[in-house]
Amino acid sequence: MKRTLIFASTVVVALTATAYAVANGIEGAKSVKAVAGTFDATTASKVETRTCTTSDGKTLVTTNGRYTGTASGDPDLTGAVTLDARSTINSTDNIGVVSGTLRIDVASGSDTRANFDAVYSGGQIAGLTNGHSHDPHLRLLANISAAFTAASGFTGGKIGGGTSGGAAVELGPGKCERTSTVKQTSRASGTVSAVSSTSITVAGLTCSVPASLQSSVAALTVGARAEIQCSLVDNANTLVKVEAKKH
């Protein structure tokens, strides 16, 4: 399936990381209170990764995963934390985006829940999260930053409290093809002209013998008839199937 995402270095959005978060609605707010928390979510599960190449030769890696750990700080930001994240990263230039949902199981009341969108640059994310705290009437709007890898999750995460600034990306149209590996195979059927524990030659085709097929090849002798199938592995023809034939 074709993808339609490309990245460019043009700065179109500046994500400014400040040291506070806002609780309650912005318009008609009855209170504005600074809150802050930290988190690590390094237990990864349900991780699915796809790779493709853009029309300009960049490698895009898209990953969906769930990452769990612990958060601490203000009461609404303390507890077990779960982030369901989707990352799309241009691994050639080490830039991309990470977005998803964040849930903190607080000690009392409902969970703190929020959506987040962040720019990824050089292993770090910085962006904004928007949702509500344990009281659904209290809005949470905060800067968020962390170190991130799709395999290991989030470390050194901050919600408010001096979050780190990030880069900016531009998303636009373009072609992106999934990478694929083309296997080169060859077959031969005829007389075995040479055979050993490491190679076999049938009808002029010579292939190296992997350990998994050495016992099958050992049953063959020069002059016997056989059919072999080989694949090109690291620029060497390697036996993948062998079958003895009757004269």
Image (tube, rainbow, N blue to C red):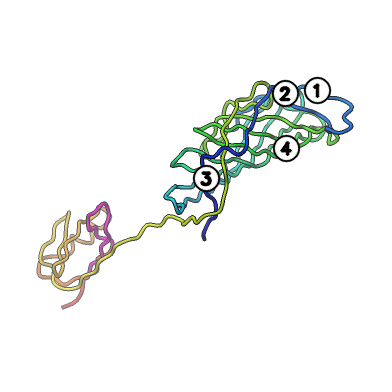
The answer for how far apart the CA atoms under marks 4 and 3 are is 26 Å
Give the quadrant of residue 74: top right
The crowding category of the residue bearing disc 3, from other C-alpha atoms within 10 Å (few below 14, some 14 to 19, many at least 20), is: many
Split into 4 quadrants, where in the image is the C terminus?
A: bottom left
Mark 3 and mark 1 residues within 8 Å of each other at the beta carbon: no
Image point (23%, 67%), residue name: 228
Image point (16%, 67%), residue name: 202
- Residue 109: x and y in percent read 82, 32
Of circles 3 and 1, the one toward us is 3
Label 4 or label 3, whichever comes before in sequence order: 3
The residue pinned by badge 2 equals 20
Q: Residue 66: say if magenta.
A: no
Of circles 4 and 2, the one toward us is 2
- Residue 176: x and y in percent read 49, 55
Q: Residue furthest bottom?
A: 247
Q: Give, as a three-letter code, the residue at label 4.
A: Ala
- Residue 212: x and y in percent read 28, 55
Q: Relative to the observer, which residue lies in front, 82 or 28?
A: 28
**Which span is picked out in magenta?**
228-240
The residue pinned by badge 4 equals 114
